[in-house]
Image: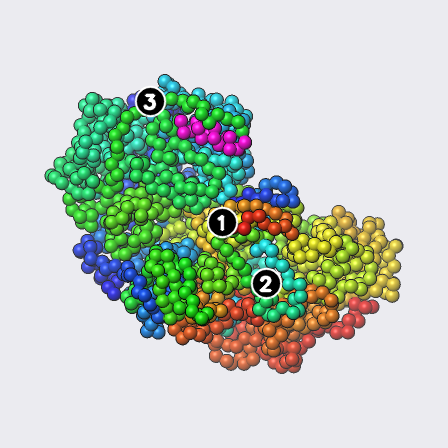
Amino acid sequence: MTQQNRLQSGGRIQRNKALSFSYNGKTFKGFEGDTLASAMLANGIDVVGRSFKYSRPRGIVAAGPEEPNAVLQLGATEATQVPNVRATQQELFDGLVSNATNGWPNADMDLMGYVGKMGGRMMPPGFYYKTFMYPQSLWDTYESFIRKAAGLGRSPLENDPDTYDHLNQHADVMIVGAGPAGLSAALQAARSGARVLIADEQSEFGGSLLHSNEQIDGKPAAQWVAETVAELSSFNNVIMLPRSTVNGYHDHNFLTIHQRCTDHISDRAPEGQVRQRLHRVRAKWVVLASGAHERPLVFGHNDVPGVMVASAVSIYVNRYAVAPGKELVLMTTNDGAYQTALDWANAGRKVIAIVDTRANPQGELIEKARTAGLKVITGSAVIDVQGSKRVTGVSVAPIDADGGRVTGSIDRLSCDTVASSGGWSPVIHLSCHTGSRPVWNDDVIGFLPGETVQRQLTAGSINGEFNLKGCLEQGTRMGAQAAVNAGFEANVDAPAATAAVIAQGPAMALFHIPHNKPTSRAPKQFVDFQNDVTAAGIELATREGFESIEHVKRYTAMGFGTDQGKLGNINGMAIAAKSLNKTIPETGTTIFRPNYTPITFGAIAGRHCGELFDPKRYSSMHKWHVENGAKFEDVGQWKRPWYFPQAGESMQDALNRECLATRESVGILDASTLGKIDIQGKDCREFLARVYTNAWAKLPVGKCRYGLMCGEDGMVFDDGVTSCLGENHFLMTTTTGGAARVLTWLELYHQTEWPELEVYFNTVTDQWSTLTVSGPNSRKLLAELTDDIDLDRDNFKFMDWREGTMAGVPARVFRISFTGELSYEINVQANYGLHVWEKLFEAGAKYNLTPYGTETMHILRAEKGFIIAGQDTDGSVHPYDLGMGWCVAQKKPFSYIGKRGMAREDCVRDNRKQLVGLKTKDPQAVIPEGAQAVKDPNQPIPMTMLGHVTSSYYSAFLGHSVAMGFVRDGLSRMGETVYYPLADGSVIEAEICSPIFLDPKGERQNV
Amino acid sequence: MFDIYCPHCQEHREEEEFHASGEAHIARPLDPDNCTDKEWAEYIYFRKNPRGIHHELWVHAAGCRKFFNITRDTQTYEIKETYKVGQQPTVTE
Amino acid sequence: MQKYSGFGLFKHALSHHENWQRVWRNPTPKKQYDVIIVGGGGHGLATAYYLAKEHGITNVAVLEKGYLGGGNTARNTTIVRSNYLWDEAAHLYEHAMKLWEGLSQDLNYNVMFSQRGVLNLGHTLQDMRDIERRVNANRLNGIDGEVLDAKQVQEIVPMMDCSENARFPVMGASWQPRGGVARHDAVAWGYARAADALGVDLIQQCEVVDFVMEDGAAVGVRTRQHGTIGAGRIGCVTAGNSGVMAKLAGFELPLESHPLQALVSEPIKPILDTVVMSNHVHGYVSQSDKGDLVIGAGIDGYLGYGQRGSYSTIEHTVQAIVEMFPVFSRVRMNRQWGGIVDTCPDACPIISATPVENLFFNCGWGTGGFKATPGSGNVFAATLAKGEAHPLAKPFSMFRFHDGSLIDEHGAAGVAH
């Protein structure tokens, strides 16, 4: 294919590096240095998509992030699909595969377009709120059609093969935008020695200078750019990031930069490289030099392919050597856009006319155009466009001085390209991200950054400074100022690079071009191309009473596209304001929020996915568990062995075996994950008495005690055994999941309430491995591994602990029991954990030492009626609800945490839900955990629920099920029957009983 | 994302190292047992929740583990000062 | 009120849409109303509508300091479900659900309530116990729901990673088929239009700066723009500003106002046909009719009235979404925003009389406000009409914090909304 619109010379493209790409299955050629958009235009591709609502053919209108139409599907393989790529920002690479996102059978020949043409009038803004309601039953059907029409591109259906990085940056001066202002600022800041970070969304630095004909310091602008970039590169205190969009400006000068590292090479990152990088920047000072976007004018059929923003035409001609047509009509409200006509003529293409909305424009560029022989029609406007898939001509008519009305007869001009300029809108997005309200400026005809609490300066056309000289000066001053503010020495009056000032006449504040018909009857005049929002739609919204600009935006969907209204929003606000007889500042603006342009989810996630989504914590014995076939359970970040199935065993088989082995001989549990907090200091006893509900004053050294912790509301939130290691030294254990929370809570009370208590807390969870050996043979087994701990039942009693060695390593052994059996918890330094574990198995073979996991632990403790905080509690139960009043001290001198809370009116009333045991009528029936109890299983729905089952298992040792659950007033309803109606319609009947199903006297643990 | 000066570490660190812990300067009643239910509820649940200057408790969770106070504007998110527990704020409006 | 219908739309198309009626009037406030609603969000507008429709009280003004539906109504993730744990909350949200089910027809305004089902995922054994407990309670309360295993979840959401390889593999889910999403703005506009048609005055740009008190009772409000306006009863429905309003009335609330953020992707072709929420992995997502993936984040931990939160919260949320849906890694995030949620210690709202006579508050919905809109307005209207709590509102008195009768919905409310 030939590049029929490629100019013979000029541009920044590499003509010796031809690249081929495909669009909608056809192959085309472009050059290195092209964007996908410039290459498409070079090849004469007019239609790049179909519009969302009316399915109208759409072409490229802009050259940067403001492009609303050229939004394509990219990707050569399924896994590397990228939806919604803006062709104007995608650099061309060899082998690029692109497709239009809408249109059936294709964008060029779209059958939906006929529906749009016929049905368009039925689809004013908000039409869906007014219809599809009747009959109610059909809404699902209506909606399925609405959804089919939705969306632009499509998500890949395979997992992303690429990786993404995060990089934290600290900058003294962060500069956003590398145009004339940004580069000038960077130079000054760099020379001060400040750490400078400068980012720009384009492939190379220079901004508007990359397509400018102007001179700086007497040299072509592009040469000044090259020299400036070269100088910046020579500083080792400067980081330059092209292809990097500053997307979000967050509080306290935190900014995010989305760097596209390899998207210009391929749709898949080369081996070993990251596709994109998200820079997280904390900057001392920020200089926003983000420039301005040109506004198109709003006129009839202004969406026909071939209608473009004026400066975009210049960019394609000058930077990419592409003239996107043959014959141009330019419409403008200002002098600046005349340059586009001059560029077009210089490229050897025909300027049909310059249509100036002003009656008597005066200025250097106008003179230049007239001198060049270009036809200038003043006091007039292009009121509509002819053509469907490409412009074929325009209607031009005289308008009155304020642009409100057509005043004379209409002329037709033939052309294939229309460029329009309504002036420039400063790119103030980032300055608004932290809540700063922009301020309208009548001279600029645009919003400027408002007051902010961020350490932020602005330079260049973001301030409405549209002259090159002024941009260079502002950049120079603000770069130095930012450096000074950040604590560096710089001269804020340093001379800036110089450029000629082009004398310009005043621009006209005109947004919406009048038509000889009223807006409601005129040809569609588009404001927001991506969402098919028209001037008539906005006027209708205001007529219907949507008077706030936020209402207008939401009712019409203006600005909700992937371009976020960069082209259309100001025009839309102006149309709404006019329709409401208000000024633009009175109507106000909508708020800009991150992102400035869309960011890949993968880049935001970075490496924090999959294996690195959340750290996994393993105990020292994890390797052994894996080798021995453990199934694991996630508890917090820990991977805990759940059960250890043997070949051919079901889960229940394994549990039965593990339970029986423990009850009949000896079992072992890896309990290392329990939280362990080392507490020292002369007041730790007093402290414990305040945070636990029971008494601690007299616990002697060498003893352990179980404790309950409540919040100030009296509700149980954690529990565990705490041991007295020394007069001023305790070891607290907590639940696995609650460890961090408990430590923070202890610190909170110590630091903020009782700093006078001398007490120190340290987490030692990871320092110790905990091996729980449980069962009648546990003492015999331990005896084989120690020669310095006296295990005699009378010398080492239940709830004692001893220090000594175990399998040759230093150990603390606690005789405590969560199974009800004779049981020891061995704590050894974590790096010895596996060693001791293995030694236990060597010695334990003759006792059939059996490893068990959390599930067997749960069964064994449930047989004994022991609670698990978090499973049998839910933050709404106090110790008495649990039947654990025995663990609440009444006479402690200090009003410990939880005491007052559990005395509140609602906590002491009758009829609270209380934890009880549940004996099923059918001993083999296991009530599902979470089942809800009712008194009368035949009560119609809604039923009166009495409480739910918290723990329920089949006990192989007892030969029947065991369960615990809450029942309203349960502790005084022993022996009564409750019913559990299940989802499958069956009902399980159970008798309320004590939760202690095994050995109520505690004889087994005391042997 | 906040840039927070820890008065204990004496340097600015990222918000991700800290946890907000609610309103500061809420003292636990000295005699809880003689509080009415209403007084107790006010201590544990009721808060000033201002739009504007707020004195709040934070903890340097992934740092020194110390609690400290911040005076912050809840509208603009400006941090006016940070100070240790036991000290009084200098910015009050 | 001009009735909306497909035929009406056709008729208006013929006249170039030049003759549509205003959706609501722009009245000048009267000196005195029977009831003043402070706050013109979804809940306030619904309250006004039901006051007029169900209680015949039409001398009502809704005073809104900004624009109607401009607070959390305009900035939530539009999820509707009623599968709450405790009876009190479940009945209230189910009351709302039933009203949702006929709302478009009732209001003659299509709120696009789409019952595409809501999945609350379980990733741990305790998650699954909690799900069983909640679904059983829901079922016996007459609320639809079932417990699904991982395989069934995968069938409903084929694009989600339900494999064993995930960091926290999906073990199952609760499934409420009647849950779904609605078009948030339309809810506010539909209620506003219908309330206006029944005679309610909707006053925008009217900020209440104080309450007028007589003998300890509220008898009116002072406004910034329209002076003093008298009222028999006042209902304050100012999510995101409740604490400030309470302070004006001279009391504190058990509330904290936090930023709650959300984000959307660029619009993509339909790929997710239901609402997926995970408390454990900490994110939730649905796809709008426009094609955006609508994603909710967790609450930021600090007080914040800035309608924005911290980037790290967004980051964690996106990590969760990519973890659940690795295929979304190359999709792009378009926009993020924040709301202000008033959160109660028990994650349940306050619908209540206050220490000030004639002054009632409806607040503290935390993350649950949008889904409750019709029910909240309905019971609050009844409360204002009678001067005492509607039976469904009774458990949600602000005085429950005094005696300790909290309704702890943290498990069901959590991050997921």
Task: Tell me the amino acid under the disc marked 1.
Answer: Gly
> Which residue extends farthest top?
A218
Q: Residue at x 36, y 37 (%)?
A: A426
Q: Which mark is residue C309?
A: 1
Q: Is residue A800 above or below residue A552?
A: below
Rendered position, C215 above or below A343: below
The N terminus of chain A - image quarter: top left
- Residue A500 is labelled as 3
Label 1: chain letter: C
Q: Mark 3 or mark 1, which is nearer to you? A: 3
Magenta segment, principal secondary structure? helix
Please name the amino acid that badge 3 sits on: Ala
Q: Give the residues in magenta.
A: A473-487
- Residue drawn 39% across and 31% down? A460
Q: Position of residue A275 (x, y in %)?
A: 49, 37
Q: Is residue A775 above or below residue A326?
A: below
